Amino acid sequence: MRVFDRGRFIGSGLFNSGSLIAVRLYSTEDEELEPGLVRRRLERALQVRQEALPGEADFRLAFGESDMLPGLVIDKYGGHFAVQAYSAGMDMRLEMVVAALGELFDVLSVYEKNDFRMRAQEGLGRREGPLAGTPASFVTISEDGAQFGVDIAAGQKTGYYYDQRLTRRRVRALSRGRRVLDAFCYTGSFAVNAALGGAERVLAVDESAPAVALATRNAA
């Protein structure tokens, strides 16, 4: 829809009368969020990541409003992708998203991780499963020289907390000679970075047995 403020055009947005956020802007131009625009948005998002993370192949490709794709999260694990849609407008366009990914990358699989409660606020049901290709049961990613195993299907949210990359770097930089506790460790990514940063001792804990097993594997 076209959005105006007291007669002045602001931009184009996705409208949902049943949501707490009625309009989510995706452009400051008068244009539809059609397949070509979805692809251009993802191309631009990829360019930004390549400039910010040179040489990295694993990262968060799309992060909602910050990439002008409101309500969409895409995590890239080599040729495997995890997708989350937390707005009705983006949920309706998941086929466009999958098609655009196929045009931009050598896609091995796209896995939908839409089994979370917040979707109810958009009037959406909960879903999870493959959208394209054959999902891997387990993938290994590289981040700042460290290797981490990720279970996309069984993992939390989209599998790995890529949005904490800068925090992990900071932990690594501050850890030399310190004793570090990584509480609620999940993949153990903070513990591993603390160890790589020269921590004297690192303890990672989690109430989830699968998380502890994954963290142990990543620390090996």
Image (tube, rainbow, N blue to C red):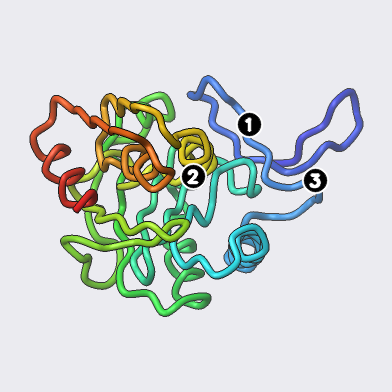
Quarter of the figure with the N terminus: top right
Place residue 192 in its image quadrant: top left
User: In this view of the protein, which residue sits in the foreground, 64 or 35?
Assistant: 64
Distance from disc 3 to disc 1, alpha carbons, whole Å, reads: 13 Å
- Say which amino acid is labelled 1: Val
* Residue appearing at x 54%, y 41% in the figure: 166
Which amino acid type is shown beneath numbered disc 2? Arg
Along the horizontal axis of the image, is 59 left or right of 180?
right
Residue 28's mark? 3
Q: Secondary structure at mark 2?
A: helix
* Vertical placement of residue 117 versus 31, above or below: above
Label at residue 162: none
Q: Earlier in the sequence, mark 1 or mark 2?
A: 1
Mark 2 — residue?
Answer: 165
Pick whichever of labels 3 and 2 is earlier in the sequence.
Answer: 3
Amino acid marked by disc 3: Thr
Which residue corresponds to mark 1? 23
| Identity of the residue drawn at 52% across and 57% down | 61
Q: Could you tell me residue 172's position as x and y percent?
A: 46, 41
**Earlier along the polypeptide chain: callout 3 or callout 1?**
1
